[in-house]
Image: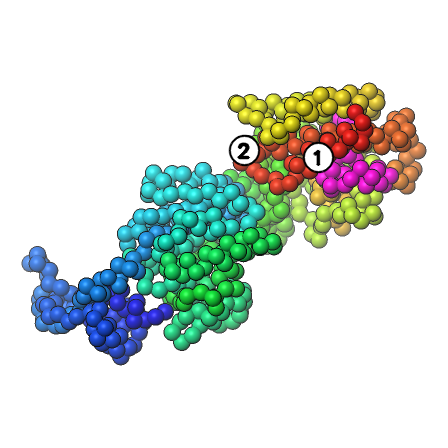
């Protein structure tokens, strides 16, 4: 960075430092320190003064008798103090505030972040975000805004404990940090401020009450790196940034932006926020693309071991050994108990795509684990999502897995808890989800559905659209809640007509999956498997076809094609009279299919409404589901 400006700040913070001490603190050569001091004096920012010192420090007026002779030795020396001009310069560069980014999920830290935001994880018994707040307070910075999103309620205690402000980012789940900074922009306008990540850990306090220059912290990365490499001028000014490189200083840790810099940067931030295709942008993407149009920003070099950005649980284990034995995660404790191993043998943790009902993660048992039967093998742990206790009967789900086990159409289970829905299952190498846009894959999946429907398996609980619609409506409305669809009351009579239409068709009943989305069919080396049986129950097998269609956003004509695939699968398996027909003509089946699609869409739109009350959002999904009902009504003329 601009060394002379930083030197002036050091003189303010350490007025008794000698030139040599200033050189050590700033990393400048002694000659450069002297030149800078001379320049500042000539410009009227500093002036010399004589004072008594004890070993390079001002004399202590209450020195004790126990001090050694060397400690008491007094010598005369010259010191430098700030002039009024120098003080005015520093006052203009006073740090006003700090912004801490804490809205994200932290997917690389699953399963810990299912229960606790990453910034609230402890390192050596201290929460990472609290450590940073304390460091800011040490230098007099109390205007601290924390941008929250995921598990926002977990941060509320910080308001009372430290006097911080919380700012909610409503787009935390759909946009990256560009969106976070956009939503926080008004809190930072007209201020000199730090930008921090809640999940960083700084060994020493690197913050100051005065910052003369805008900067980005930088650490040197040896060898090849995927970090963001900084290319700088001789004085440290950042000229360009590229992702990846080798043996280079990289963006790593806190940032400081002067108000003049942010004022110039803000229009670009707003512009890129509104550009299509920038949902995954970090705010640094905008910085990288607009550097040449902005005031100078410098590289702030940090020594090795000063800043830590933990990439995953295994890195945290290497730093704080507590995590080798007890991470505080319920899921990790469960896996440890099921496999009879310590937590340190649970490795290669990775977030899988979050479902709409549950969260799941992949893990491996260490290849040198004491559990020889499972060493080196991969598994999936499923954690029930928020509010699922009211949506799913886990005892019924567990019963389904037992009932269909001999059909060999499900994934292999190692553990299932019927009380809370935690599940551990085998991970199939090179497995992939089905793609209903490919006819051969659709037919393979319909063959599995046919096997289920013709398997003559029965359970004591039905899946009733009538009961499901009434129940979801009730839980949406309980406690003074409301259903967010403006015309819902007008829809209800049409719902009754459509229900009556399906019930009068004398539908056959068999065990159905109900959640026959393409993602719940997986292609493995051992054949097609069906997963996630949470909603399974006795129902019309045609309902499974309807559910599979709406999950893939098929229109009514495409859904008829899916029905045709099912019937062709029955023909191929030589099932002369599949249960699905039950004396119904093809025309009747096609009309019933449309009705089932409409009612199923309405059902899941109410499901979404309930989940939205719990703070979850599903984008356009809820609207698409509701639209199925309205389009079915029009098509059937009910």
Dot 2: few (<14), some (14–19), or many (≥20) neighbours within 10 Å?
few
Marks 1 and 2, how far apart in space? Answer: 23 Å
> Which one is in front, 217 or 2?
2
Q: Tell me: 404 left or right of 72.
A: right
Q: How many marks?
A: 2
Q: Is residue 558 magenta?
A: yes
- The magenta stretch is 537-566
Residue at 77 percent of width and 27 percent of height: 539
Magenta part mainly helix, strand or loop? Answer: helix
Its colouring scheme is rainbow
Q: Tell me: 598 left or right of 172.
A: right
Residue 327 in sight from this viewpoint = no
Q: Quadrant of the C terminus?
A: top right
| Residue 254 percent across, percent down from the top left | 41, 58
Residue at 48 percent of width and 68 percent of height: 292
> Which one is in front, 303 or 83?
83
Residue at 25 percent of width and 70 percent of height: 22
Q: Which mark is residue 344?
A: none
Q: Tell me: 476 left or right of 221.
A: right
| Residue 576 percent across, percent down from the top left | 93, 33
> Which one is in front, 84 or 169?
84
Tell me if residue 301 comes above or below residue 492 in the rendering: below
Instruction: Write down the residue under mark 2.
Output: 614
Q: Which mark is residue 627?
A: 1
| Residue 353 percent across, percent down from the top left | 62, 46
Instruction: Give the SS element for disc 1.
Output: helix
Pick out the residue farthest to the left: 65
Who comes first in sequence, dot 1 or dot 2? 2
């Amino acid at each position: 960075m601009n060394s002379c400006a930083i030197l002036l700040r050091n003189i303010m913070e350490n007025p008794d430092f000698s030139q040599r001490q200033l050189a050590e603190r700033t990393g400048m050569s002694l000659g450069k320190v002297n030149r800078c001091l001379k320049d500042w004096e000539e410009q009227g920012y500093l002036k010399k003064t004589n004072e008594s010192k004890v070993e390079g420090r001002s004399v202590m007026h209450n020195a004790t008798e126990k001090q050694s002779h060397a400690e008491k030795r007094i010598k005369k020396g010259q010191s430098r103090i700030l002039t009024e001009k120098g003080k005015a310069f520093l006052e203009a560069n006073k740090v006003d505030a700090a912004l801490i980014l804490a809205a994200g999920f932290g997917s690389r830290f699953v399963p810990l972040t299912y229960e606790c935001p990453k910034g609230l994880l402890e390192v050596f018994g201290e929460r990472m975000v609290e450590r940073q707040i304390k460091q800011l307070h040490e230098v007099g910075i109390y205007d601290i805004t924390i941008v929250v999103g995921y598990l926002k309620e977990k941060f509320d205690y910080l308001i009372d404990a430290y006097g911080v402000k919380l700012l909610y980012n409503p787009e935390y789940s759909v946009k990256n940090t560009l969106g976070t900074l956009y939503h926080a922009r008004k809190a930072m306008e007209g201020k000199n401020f730090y930008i921090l990540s809640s999940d960083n850990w700084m060994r020493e306090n690197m913050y100051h009450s005065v910052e003369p220059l805008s900067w980005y912290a930088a650490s040197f990365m040896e060898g090849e790196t995927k970090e963001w490499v900084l290319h700088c001028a001789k004085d440290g000014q950042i000229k360009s940034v590229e992702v990846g490189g080798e043996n280079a200083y990289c963006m790593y840790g806190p940032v400081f932006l002067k108000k003049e810099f942010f004022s110039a940067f803000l229009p670009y931030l707003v512009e890129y926020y509104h550009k299509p295709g920038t949902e995954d942008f970090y705010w640094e993407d905008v910085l990288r693309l607009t550097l040449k149009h902005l005031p100078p920003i410098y590289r702030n070099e940090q020594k090795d071991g000063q800043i830590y950005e933990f990439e995953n649980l295994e890195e945290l284990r290497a730093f704080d050994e507590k995590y080798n034995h007890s991470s505080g995660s319920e899921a990790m404790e469960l896996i440890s108990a099921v496999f009879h191993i310590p937590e340190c043998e649970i490795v290669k943790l990775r977030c899988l795509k979050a479902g709409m009902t549950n969260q799941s993660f992949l893990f491996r048992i260490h290849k040198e684990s004491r559990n020889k039967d499972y060493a080196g093998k991969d598994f999936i742990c499923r954690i029930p999502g928020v509010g699922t206790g009211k949506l799913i009967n886990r005892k019924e789900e567990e019963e389904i897995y037992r009932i269909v086990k001999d059909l060999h159409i499900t994934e292999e289970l190692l553990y299932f808890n019927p009380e809370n829905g935690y599940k551990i299952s085998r991970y199939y190498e090179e497995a992939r989800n089905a793609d209903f846009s490919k006819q051969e894959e659709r037919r393979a999946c319909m063959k599995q559905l046919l096997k289920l429907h013709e398997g003559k398996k029965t359970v004591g609980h039905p899946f009733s659209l009538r009961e499901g619609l009434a129940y979801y409506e009730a839980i949406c409305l309980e406690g003074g809640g409301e259903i967010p669809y403006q015309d819902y009351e007008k829809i209800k009579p049409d719902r009754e007509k459509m229900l009556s239409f399906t019930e009068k068709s004398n539908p056959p009943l068999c065990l159905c999956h109900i959640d026959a989305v393409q993602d719940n069919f997986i292609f493995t080396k051992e054949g097609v498997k069906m997963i996630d049986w949470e909603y399974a129950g006795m129902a019309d097998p045609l309902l499974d076809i309807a559910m599979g269609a709406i999950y893939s956003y098929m229109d009514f004509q495409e859904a008829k094609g899916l029905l045709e695939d099912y019937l062709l699968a029955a023909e191929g398996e030589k099932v002369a009279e599949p249960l699905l027909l039950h004396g119904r003509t093809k025309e009747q089946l096609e009309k019933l299919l449309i009705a089932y699609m409409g009612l199923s869409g309405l059902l899941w739109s109410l499901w979404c409404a309930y989940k939205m009350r719990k703070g979850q959002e599903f984008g356009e999904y809820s609207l698409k589901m509701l639209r199925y009902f309205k389009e079915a009504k029009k098509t059937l003329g009910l």
